[in-house]
Amino acid sequence: MSERRTRDWRVAAALWFALTLAGQAVALGLVRAGFRVGYQHYVPADELFDAAHAPALLFLLAQALAVAVGIRPHLPALARWIGSALAGWRGPAVAAAFIVSSATLSRSPAMYAAELVLASLIQALVLATVFLFAASLPRDAAGIVDRWLDRAPPVPDTGPGAGFDRFALAAALFVTVLCAALAAFSYQRHPHVPDEVIYLMHARYFAAGLLDLPLPPAPEAFNLDLMTYEATRWYSPVPPGWPAVLAVGAFFGAAWLVNPILNGINVLLAALVLRHTHGARTARLGVLLLACSPWFVFMGMNFMTHTLTMTAALAGALGVARLRRARGAAPGSVVFAGAGIGVLGLIRPLEGLTIAGLLGLWALAAPDRQGLLRRVVPVAAMAFVAVATAFIQLPYNRYMTGAPLTFPLMAYTDSVYGMGTNALGFGVNRGLGWPGLDPLPGHGFLDVLVNGNLNLFQLNIELLGWGIGSILPMALLLALGRLRREDLWMLAVIAAIIGVHAFYWFSGGPDFGARYWYLILVPCIALVARCIESLAQRADARAGVAALALCAAALVTFFPWRATDKYYHYRNMRPDVRQLAAAHDFGRSLVLVRGNRHPDYASAAAYNPLDLSAPQPIYAWDRSPDVRVRVLEAFADRPVWVLDGPTRTGDGFRIVRGPVPAAELLREEHARAGGAR
C-alpha cells in the first residue's frame, strides 16, 4: 500500500472515529437522567428546537448528512448482506428489538412513540458512523484483533484449568482501580440508596461482633427504612450474607473498597468460566467487554449486594465447569460449586435457588460422565455443601424472628406494609406503595410487561454503554443462527433469571441498571462476544475493530457522563455531614437534622456510632416537636447543632444553629408548646 493511500485511510478512519465519539457525546447531552430517582429519557420533541438544545440537534443533523454521503457507496453490499443473512422474519425481528429497547415507557403514549423514533434514529446514526469507521480501514487491520485474541492461553484438557490470561489479570486490576476511583470521587464513599445505609450499619455491628443493637432512646428520632424496632432492640432485617462480607471492610474502615475488590475478582472468575464454556478467544474478548461495561463497573462502585451475588454465582459456575471437565470425583470442584451456591442463598435467596437449579442441570448434563450414578452423586454432594453453607440462615432467622423459616425481611415488610405485600406471585395486595417506581397497583400480567420494558431498556443502555445500544448484537446473534451449545446455556440463564423475577412485583427501579437481572450480565457479555466473532467470520473481519471503537467511545463519553450526571450526589444523598463535623469539630454533640427521612436524615445517620453514648456526634432526625423534646431530654448533657438537609436548602447540608445547650432548646420547646395551648 502506498504511503499516500495509507495516510488517506488513516485520516478517514480518524475522522469517522472522532465523529462517533462526538455524536455519542452530543446525544447524551440530550438525555435527561440526573441525580433524582427516575428512568432516563430524551428531551421531549417540542423542546428539541429550544435554544438550549438546537445546537446539539444541528450537530446530529450534520452528522446524518455526512453519514448519508459516506454510506452511499456501501449501500449495495449492505443490502445484499441484509437480504441474505437477515431474510424472512430475521430482519423485522432484529429491527423490532433495536427499536423497542431504545426508549422506555412514558406516561403519555404519544411522548413514548416520539421518543422511540428519536432514540432509534440516534442509535442508527451511531451504527452507521461506526460502520463507516470500520469500512475506512484496510481489511488487514482486523488482523490486529485476531492476533491479540490468538495470544489467549488455551484451557488445559485436564486439571483445574488454573493460570490466568495475563490480559485478564490486567483487566481485573483496571476494573478494581476504576471502581475504587469512582467510589471515591463520584460516589464519595457515601451511601446513596436507602438499602446501602442499612447494609453499612449492619456490617458495622457485625464487625463489632453483634447481631443486633440496644434500642436507642427516643427511637422515633433514629427511624430508618429497613430497620426493625422492637421493645429492647433494633436490627437490620436484610439477609446476612452481604453485610457479613461488607463487615470485613467495615472492620478496617474501608467498606467502600469491598465492591471494587470483588469486581476485580469477578473479572478473573468470569475469564475462567468463559474459558471453560466458550474457549480462550471468546473469553478474552468477553473480558474486554466486561471491563468496559458501565453496568458492571458502576455496580462495583456502590455498597449494594449485587457484586457479591455475581462473585458467588461465578464461583459456583466455575466449580461446575471444572467438575464437567474432570475425569474423577473432583471433590474440590464440588465443594467450590456448592459453597458458591450456598453463599448466594445467604445474600439473595431467590437468586440462590435459581442459580442452584441451573448449575445442577448443567452438572447433570456433563458430556463425559456416563451413567446415572456418576452424574447424580456429584450433584447431590454439591447440593449438600450448598445447603450446609446456607444453613446458617435458619438459626439466624430464629434469633431474629423466633422461627427458623420466617425471614426477617418478610416479617418486616408484612409488619410495615401489610401481609404478603412483598411476596412472590400475583395479586392485588402486592407492592409497597411506591407509585413513582411501581406505576400499577398489585401485580399482574400487565405489570410483568411494564417491568420487562423498564429493565430491557436499562439493559440496552447500561450493559455496554454503546451508542448503538446493547441489545442489537445479541439480537443479531440469534437472528444469524448457528448457535452453539454454550450459547444455549447462556440463553437458559438469561431466561431463568428474567422468568423468576417476573413473579416479583418490583422491577428493581432505576438504581444501577436492571439490577434485579444483574446475574444475566456475564451471559449477555458472552453472547455479545459470540456475535462479534460471528460477524467477523461471516460478514467482515473488521467487526472486532468496530467493537473496540464502541468500547473506547463508551469509556470516553458514557462513563464520565454517568459518573457526573447521575451518581454524583445521587438521590440527593451527600457526605456534607462528614465534612461539616470535621470543619466545625462537632465532637461529643447532638446534631438535629431537619428534613425528610431520606435523603436528609439517612445521609447523616450513616455516620452515627453504634454506641450512642460514645464521645462522638449523634445524629437524630428532628421530625416533629414532640420527638425533638424527647431526644433533647435523652441527650441533655450534650451541646446541640441544628442542620437543614438538602430538601430544605435546595443544595447541601447547612448549619442553622449551634452549638447550643440542650437545656436552652428544651426551654424554647416548652415555651412554644405553652404558647400554643
Image: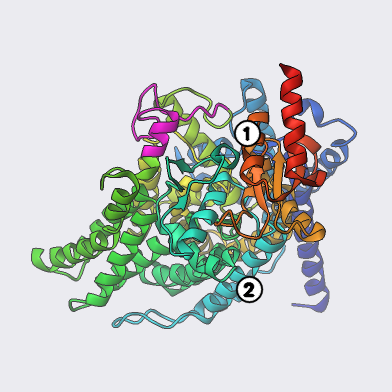
Residue 418 within the segment the image draws in magenta = yes
Horizontally, is 431 left or right of 663 in the view? Answer: left
| Residue at 48% in and 65% down | 207
| Residue at 35% in and 50% down | 349
Residue to which mark 1 is pinned: 627
Of residues 390 and 622, the one nearer the viewer is 622
Question: Would you identify the image quadrant in which residue 219 lies?
Answer: top right
Element type where label 2 sits in the image? helix
Horizontally, is 128 left or right of 328 in the view? Answer: right
Picture coordinates of residue 309 (x, y %)? 43, 58
Residue 118 within the segment the image draws in magenta = no
Q: How is the image coloured?
A: rainbow
Q: Which mark is residue 195?
A: none
Predominant secondary structure in magenta?
loop
Q: Residue furthest right?
A: 51
Mark toward the start of the polypeptide (1 vs 2): 2
Horizontally, is 628 left or right of 455 in the view? Answer: right
Q: Amino acid at mark 2?
A: Asp
Picture coordinates of residue 509 (x, y %)? 54, 39
Does residue 304 appear anywhere in the picture?
Answer: no
The stretch in magenta equals 411-435
How many angstroms separate mark 1 from mark 2 (CA)?
Answer: 74 Å
Residue to which mark 2 is pinned: 140
User: Which quadrant does the C terminus fall into?
Assistant: top right
